[in-house]
Image (tube, grey):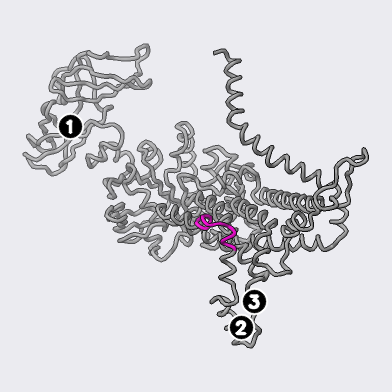
Amino acid sequence: MSSATARKSARLGRWLVSGPPVLYLVVFFAVPTLIMVLASFRTPGEFGGLAPLVEDGKLDLNLESYARFFSEAIYAEIFLKSVWYALATTFFCLALAYPLAALIARSPKRYRDLLLLLVILPFWSNFLIRIYAWMIILGPNAALARTVNGILGGFGHEPVPLLFSSFAVLVCLVYVSLPFMVLPLYANLEKHDQALLDAAQDLGANAWQRFWRITFPLSLPGVFAGSALVFIPALGIFAIPDILGGPEDSLIGNVIKQQFLETRDWPFGSVLSIVLTVAALAIAGFAAWVARRNLGTPSSAREASA
Amino acid sequence: MPLLEIQNVTRRFGAFTAVDNVSIGIEAGEFFTLLGPSGCGKTTLLRTIAGFETPDGGSILLNGEDLADRPPERRPTRMVFQSYALFPHMTVEGNVAFPLQMSNVPSSEIPGKVREALEDVRLTGFGKRYPHELSGGQKQRVAIGRALVTHPKVLLLDEPLAALDAKLREEMQLELINLQKEVGITFVYVTHDQTEALALSHRIAVMNKGRVEQLDEPSKIYGFPRTRFVADFIGHCNIFSGPVKDRDGGLVTLEVPGLGPVRVAADAQVASGGAGSVALRPEKIRIQASAPEGTPDNHYRGTVADLLYMGDVTVYKVATPGGMRVEALLANSQSGRAKFFEVGDAVDVSWPVDAGYFIAE
């Protein structure tokens, strides 16, 4: 075989391997995103959906939906509230997942797979079913609510509803997001070199100093990966506030869903979706930038996470 | 009184005894080496001195003080790890400053001490680099500088040169000798490489199966191995074993199967009828075409079965008619001649009675 045909067949092989996933992403991700971007500049139809793109021989594209988003404070407020919920979810997940991931990473090898299996076990039942299960756990007649209100009653406090509250939304957000924080943290911590901790100890560092000077900085790539995996989906979620939240707990995801399904204002729903996507990308980019700065050079971060 | 006293230290892992009742006294300013094959307990003993392993028996004293209650972070010892264990997220300066920060050295004094330590290990100007930007030898020097910056009483080195290539290793050996002289800190060095141990150390403890087989100066370890293991482990050695046939004052005659009677000078108490071995370095054996008459030496005839030309020397394996193999080494110093003998040549091998070392069994 000549080298030209060899190169040709190598190129064909590459396309056979990478073609299908690229095609999939183009059809189901790039094209819908473009449709959405286009829709955000169009006029809503009289009975929902979109007005015709070309009317009286004129292209009907405008910035009205964007103008509406930036002129009505309520949407910015909901947006900030969503960011706040997503941040709180990320924080609580990190606080819970770090010790858990460290525990799994340090447990004997033969138990690690079992413990990891337990972490991902919830994925075996349906997402919505697990949310509905929280309705039962947090319900007014369930043991949890009775105990809490019994204790509050002892202090002469009015009973508080656990269900249909910000509390319920946050608890469930943390619950569904936790594995996404544990797994990248575990993947990072499991690779840490014990010799580094031995060296730090030999050089005079106590347990507290070993954690904050060695383990934690080296785990930052895992922390940022886990935080991105938790924060971004939490920012756009609508099912949990829908099912477990009160009227005050409508988040940006709920508003987007409402625009598309109930109000049927597709252009405005598209605007909200685009703002959400841009915000998520901006925050993730900012986090990556902070990570790089904290870890010195990108390659040292890679070395630590490798 | 020795600076570091290891007294009857034993360390077990389940049924396996890694360190078995070891007692060693190491003097201040000494370059001391623990030498042995992998699994002999040398690294475990080093980690016990550092405090990472708790002895199951015995104690470790530094300046007369028992270290038992001190965790590694509170011992005045520092360890250099085989993998260097540099902190990848800190610069060279950050790594070297770390132990100073841990011992609460005022931050105004840190840069000066870091600079001094980097000077000591000849890394001036590398302070801002990250470990992944350094070569193996440079990483090694950072590790040593980091361990020395707080002026510990004892520096523990766990096979620090094992990951370097041969040429660099030799350079680093010379640097280590000079550095140790310069700083005057006691070095306890662990290695499985006997040439490294012989080159670096003031004294060597040869370890096997958790025990110290011999503790001596390098020349004694090499020239007068006290046990069969030491003779075998350190360098190349012919070992001829057999029953003791005769004993006449300081001269023992062994009846070696396949070779014949071998006479050796010995001061060990051995009875006629016992067994023993002669350990004989290849370079102590003369190899000639024909035997000179009337010498008191051991003489044997044989043919060259194999030879290994190594540039500066040639190793000859001489087979005796009885089937014994004698390894002899000849320097290729004569100009214009690469080899003195060829495979198949009939030769005479001989050695004086005091060339070998008698090991009673």
Q: Secondary structure at mark 2?
A: helix
Q: Is residue A209 above or below residue B307?
A: below
Is B329 left or right of B168, judged from the image as shown? left
Q: Who is closer to the viewer here, B130 or A37?
A: A37
Based on the picture, tell me whether residue B125 belongs to the magenta stretch. Answer: no
| Amino acid type, residue under disc 3 in the picture | Pro
Question: Could you tell me residue A222's position as x and y percent?
Answer: 59, 52
Task: Give the quarter of the image for residue A94.
Answer: bottom right
Both on one chain, marks 1 and 3? no
Query: Which residue bears the numbered disc 3?
Result: A161
Q: Who is closer to the viewer here, B83 or A100?
A: A100
The quadrant of the rendering that contains the C terminus of chain A is top right
Query: Which residue bears the numbered disc 2?
Result: A152
Q: Earlier in the sequence, mark 3 or mark 2?
A: 2
Q: Which residues are magenta?
A: A120-131
Residue at image location 34% in from the left, 12% down from the top = B337
Q: Secondary structure at mark 1?
A: strand
Distance from label 1 to label 3 (Cα)?
91 Å
Is B4 left or right of B112, judged from the image as shown? left
| Amino acid type, residue under disc 1 in the picture | Phe
Instruction: Count neighbours of disc 1 (C-alpha within 10 A) and say few if under 14, some if 14 to 19, many if 20 or more.
Output: many
The quadrant of the rendering that contains the N terminus of chain A is top right
- Chain letter of disc 2? A
| Amino acid type, residue under disc 2 in the picture | Leu
Task: Give the quarter of the image for residue A74.
Answer: bottom right
Residue B99 can be seen in this image: no
Residue lying farthest top? B336
Query: Which residue bears the numbered disc 1?
Result: B240
